[in-house]
Amino acid sequence: MKKIMCAMMFIVMSVTMSSCSADNADAVENENNASTEKIVTNYEYNSSELETMQLINEYRVSIGLKALEKINHISFKCEEHNQYMIANNVVNHNDFTARSNNIMSVLGAKKVGENVAYNYKTSEAAVKAWLESQGHKENIEGDYTHFGISVTTDSAGRKYYTNIFAKI
């Protein structure tokens, strides 16, 4: 378990170090999201979220990997993180460990990864940027079975993307 946590922290730090936004943003140290310990079963997907998931799955299938299944609870955790980033005017992976632990606890996931992006006007642009970033591409191509996503637009029209992958 210690090796897994160390590996996860390495991945988080690697991903954090390579910015995944069209604009730069400063990170803060801690995130104070309320944890949801029960499974969230209802999530309404917007067209950008559905399109982003479809693009990720099309890419995975094109390179011989299985498509991922969406899980509403994971998308809810993504939405919580987007709301945090918007409220704090940051783009980061703060509190990823809490999100990951929640998904492992509630859904029984064995492994969790996360991609974030900011200010890409289209799903295609966000996925293209992720695929051009080694750490983000590794998540998209990773040994995962499920995923969730949230694409949230702030009051200025900027889109925030959080995409979490899980192996269940």
Image: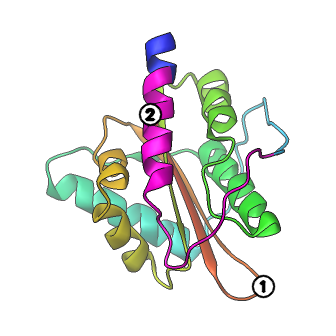
Magenta stretch: includes residue 9: yes
Residue wearing tag 2: 10
Q: Is residue 141 left or right of residue 10?
A: left
Which of 95 and 14 lies nearest the eye of the viewer? 14
Which of 123 and 6 lies nearest the eye of the viewer? 6
Residue wearing tag 1: 155
Give how far across and how far down residue 41 sits, in percent. Answer: 70, 43
Instruction: Describe the element under mark 1 as helix, strand or loop.
Output: loop
Residue depicted at x 66% and y 64%:
26
Q: Earlier in the sequence, mark 1 or mark 2?
A: 2
Give how far across and how far down residue 102 sits, in percent. Answer: 68, 30
- Range of the magenta residues? 6-31
Give how far across and how far down residue 135 sits, in percent. Answer: 35, 50
| Residue 36: quarter of image | top right
The CA distance from mark 1 to mark 2 is 34 Å
Q: Is residue 60 left or right of residue 35?
A: left
The amino acid type, in three-letter code, at marker 1 is Ser
Q: Is residue 163 left or right of residue 133?
A: right
Magenta stretch: includes residue 75: no
The amino acid type, in three-letter code, at marker 2 is Phe
Instruction: Describe the element under mark 2 as helix, strand or loop.
Output: helix
